Image: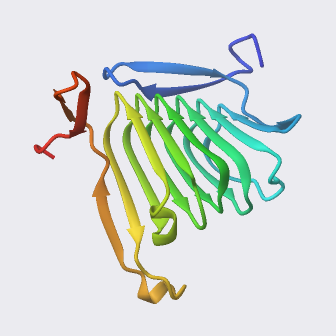
Amino acid sequence: MASDGENSAMISLPSRMGTQRHITGEPTFELLGDVWTIANQRDTTLDLSRATRTQSVQVCECDHVKLIIPDKIVSLSIVTCNNVDVDMHSSISGLELTDCTGIKIRVKSSLPSASIDKCQQVGFWITSANAEYIMFASCKSGDMNVNVNRNTSGNVDEDDWVERPIPEQFESRFNSKLQLDTKPSMLY
């Protein structure tokens, strides 16, 4: 990472409160141990075809980036990013999104879980087989949708997408055993 101003890249991302946050640092795209580290990338497409099923991918402070992950990986983590598109085959353990805006995730095979924390405008595109077991966990996030392809033939001309919102608001009530029962709000 460069320490002087003339060698470092600066990216401005909108924060959740509407102010600009500046991201500085050299663009990084490297394998460190079993973790692909991608940071400070802007306006580019990155091919992770060398990533294997024993490796994870961490993406941090990127803006307008497309990631192509054609093979299964252990996990994917995206932190403090804006407008990132991900085309991935599958993940063994799951996906984590933290403090991001404008994220699109397309999964060709399987994604067991997705954790969404402090994010806005998040979209998922998954298969109907994946929809049967994927779990979404969200906190302090909004405008989250999942699109499920009901097409099982594999022919893209027969794609049949159904869009569902991931609830942002919940209602909680005490039951007779003084435990909280929580469900999505009917306002949804």
How far from the left and from the top, in percent, is residue 48?
A: 75, 53
x, y percentage for residue 18? 31, 23
Q: Quadrant of the N terminus?
A: top right
Task: Say which residue appears at 49% left-offset and 38% top-offset.
Answer: 115
Q: Which residue corresponds to the image point at 43% horizontal and 45% vertical from the top-left?
A: 136
Query: Which residue is at the far front?
Result: 177
Q: Nearer the viewer, residue 130 or 80?
A: 130
For image coordinates 52% across by 60% down, the residue present is 106
How was this image coloured? rainbow
Tally the marks.
0
Res 25 → quadrant: top right
Q: Residue furthest left?
A: 187
Residue 109 percent across, percent down from the top left:
60, 66
Query: 140 left or right of 33?
Result: left
Between 46 and 99, which is closer to the camera in this rendering? 99
Judge whether residue 103 can be spotted in this image: no
Determine the residue located farthest toward the right in the rendered image. 33
